[in-house]
Amino acid sequence: MTNPSSGAKAPLDPAPDAAVPDPAQLRFIARMRLMMVISGATTVLAVVAIIGVIGYRLLHREGSAAKPPTDMTALLPKGAKIVGTSVSGDRIAVILDVNGSPEVRTYDLQTLRPAGTLKFATQP
């Protein structure tokens, strides 16, 4: 076989000594292949774990809109009157007038559990 640009004959086997690796090179190649397989498997496992966590959080969200609200009866102190209510974010605030003293009670909007009470008093 001749090279069309120079007319010289191309060798049939370019590097006969380099074609057969020695046993040390074969061990190194096998070790590198094993490390590549381990690295690839670890990457695939990490991606699957991340996608699994994202899917779990999307399907099992706390406070999902599909969750029906809880029914509850809140007991007020004697003589208390509801002055107003307000909803903000995931809380509902109920403003009370307890015997002339204002009080704010907050509840979690999804579970209707009490979240806190704020009482006001005048200084003597």
Image: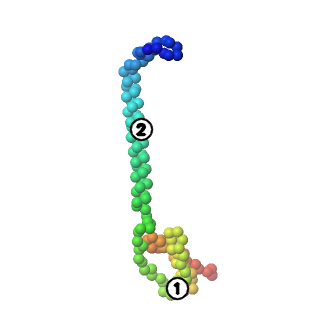
Q: How many marks?
A: 2
Picture coordinates of residue 25 (x, y %)? 40, 23
Q: Amino acid at mark 2?
A: Ser
Quarter of image, res 58 = bottom left
Q: Residue at x 48, y 84 (%)?
A: 77
Which image quadrant is residue 18 in? top left
> Which residue extends farthest right?
124
Up-down: is 29 above or below 58? above
Disc 1 is placed on an element classified as: strand
For disc 2, the marked residue is 39
Point 55% across, 83% down: residue: 83
Badge 2: how crowded within 10 Å, few (<14), some, or many (20+)? few
Q: Nearer the viewer, mark 2 or mark 1?
A: 2
Judge by depth and name the residue closer to the eye, 123 or 43: 43
Q: Residue 1 in the image: x percent, y percent? A: 43, 14
- Residue 61, relative to residue 79: is it above or below? above
Q: Earlier in the sequence, mark 2 or mark 1?
A: 2
Say which quadrant the C terminus sits in.
bottom right
Specify the amino acid type for callout 1: Lys
The dot on residue 53 is none
Which percent across, then down, holds residue 46? Answer: 42, 46
Q: From the image, tell me which residue sits under label 1.
A: 81
Q: Position of residue 96 (x, y in %)?
A: 53, 81
Residue 17 visible (yes or no) = no
Q: Is residue 111 left or right of residue 96?
A: left
